[in-house]
Image: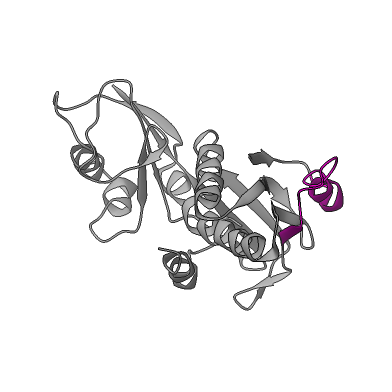
Amino acid sequence: MVTVLFFASLRERLGTGREMVPLAAPNATVSMLVESLRAREGPWSEAFAPGKAWRVAVNQRMASLATPLAAGDEVAFFPPVTGG
Amino acid sequence: MPIVRVQEADFDTGRELESLTRGRTDVGAVASFTGLVRASSEGSAVSAMTLEHYPGMTERALEEICREAHGRWDLIDTLVIHRVGSLAPGDRIVLVGVSSAHRGEAFAACEFIMDYLKTRAPFWKREDTPAGARWVEARESDEEAARGWE
């Protein structure tokens, strides 16, 4: 299992800020997790549609689709940042 | 040394900047930036702003940005205070302070820290407007400013 967090507009659109997701395979990647989220109904397929601008962090560091995932990791999805 | 705080409470700009110089005689320059909530944005009135962050990662990102500034310039201290939660027009959002022996380093590092904060630190702004609440969109001009330091 990995902990998946959603922030800001993504959290609002998906209606959740946090959930536990099982890893599909021992050598899972962010890309595989995104595919499983995209395969869901309703707002999920829309939010993770190809070309949508979102960022991903693994264990609180910026990551990419190729980043490997292990049990216990914290994965966060969020829109481009707008602080300052 | 980077000093980073993310907090709901307001801060006293004068007192925070004074903390960079109190009790020392090696500081020749302090440069600072203060960001404030404006009452209008993208052509519509803004009555309130809510700032969301990613507890843990946000602080870490700010510390990394400050450490990178220390690596690029000869600095004495860097300070970043960023507010989260509900803010009103006129409220302070962020303070960046940089101390160094000479002004050139302090000016450059202060701008660098803000440019990187804008594009790398996980904060998100939501504005309340007459048409409802909306999430602020990231600006390409901010990305360009950050790329200018690469």
Residue drawn at point x = 16 percent, y = 27 percent: A24
Q: Which residue appears farthest toward the bottom when viewing the image?
A: B43
From this viewpoint, is residue A39 visible? no
From the viewer's side, name the closer residue of B92 and A35: B92
**Quarter of the figure that contains the C terminus of chain B:** bottom left
Residue drawn at point x = 33 percent, y = 21 percent: A72
**Quarter of the figure that contains the N terminus of chain B:** top right
Side of B103 where A26 appears, left or right: left
Total number of numbered labels? 0
Side of A20 where A18 appears, left or right: right
Q: Position of residue A74 (x, y in %)?
A: 37, 29
Residue drawn at point x = 53 percent, y = 58 percent: B118
Q: Is residue B137 magenta?
A: no
From the viewer's side, name the closer residue of B70 and B25: B25
From the viewer's side, name the closer residue of A83 and B16: B16
- Note whether B35 is above or below A16 in the view shown: below
* Quadrant of residue B108 within the rendered picture: bottom right
Which range is magenta? B10-35
Q: Position of residue B46 (x, y in %)?
A: 69, 66
Q: Which residue appears farthest toward the front when viewing the image?
A: B26
- Note whether B140 is above or below A37 in the view shown: below
